[in-house]
């Protein structure tokens, strides 16, 4: 459908009220030690354990998506954008993971997904390229991607 962008806090009450789900880019090595992944890990420790298990058993690979439902909150999508935390994100993996997320969302009644600038921070990709990929991969779906960037960035 579309990509909207706004400044703010991904975890704010306003953002959570405006989105049915959250998403973030992750490596597929089972590490959430830097960036916004730390906030996800600290907010939902059980999510982190499920993510690590999915990395270990091969369910989460670059280009895949791992949905996780918070018992007290939103659906969380882990987008496999990097093979390892030492390796950069690859645009084909971002595209595939976003396409898988959008397909899952469309099939599960998710209309709006809030996410940071996936793969453009620690992943190392130019935001303009990622933005174009997000727009292309969500264009035909009934899902809005709401990109939330911290104020001042």
Image (cartoon, helix red, strand yellow):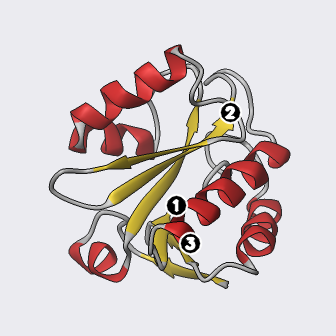
Q: Residue at x 49, y 21 (%)?
A: 30
Judge left or right: residue 146 versus residue 118: left
Q: Residue at x 24, y 41 (%)?
A: 44
Compared with 128, 44 (above or below) is above
Q: Nearer the viewer, mark 2 or mark 3?
A: 3
Mark linked to residue 116: 1
- Where does residue 151 sit, x and y in percent of width and height? 44, 72
**3D distance between C-alphas at marks 2 and 3:** 24 Å
Looking at the rendering, in which quadrant would you find the C terminus? Answer: bottom right
Q: Nearer the viewer, mark 3 or mark 1?
A: 3
Compared with 75, 140 (above or below) is below
Residue that carries the numbered disc 2 in the rendered image: 82
Residue that carries the numbered disc 3 in the rendered image: 106
- Where does residue 71 sit, x and y in percent of width and height? 18, 51
Residue neighbourhood size for the residue with mark 3, other residues' Cα within 10 Å, grouped as few (<14), some (14–19), many (≥20): some
Q: Residue at x 45, y 73 (%)?
A: 110
């Amino acid at each position: 459908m579309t990509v909207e962008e706004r400044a703010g806090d991904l975890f704010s009450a306003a953002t959570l009220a405006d989105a049915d789900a959250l998403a973030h880019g992750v490596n597929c090595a089972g590490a959430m030690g830097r960036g916004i992944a730390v906030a996800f890990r600290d907010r939902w420790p059980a999510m982190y354990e499920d993510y690590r298990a999915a990395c270990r058993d091969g369910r989460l690979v670059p280009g895949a998506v791992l949905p996780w439902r918070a018992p007290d909150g939103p659906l969380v999508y882990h987008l496999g954008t990097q093979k390892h935390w030492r390796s950069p994100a690859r645009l084909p993996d971002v595209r595939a993971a976003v396409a898988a997320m959008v397909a899952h969302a469309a099939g599960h009644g998710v209309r709006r997904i809030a996410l940071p600038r996936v793969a453009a921070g620690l992943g190392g990709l130019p935001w303009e390229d990622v933005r174009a990929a997000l727009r292309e991969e969500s264009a035909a779906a009934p899902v809005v991607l709401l990109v939330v960037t911290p104020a001042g960035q």
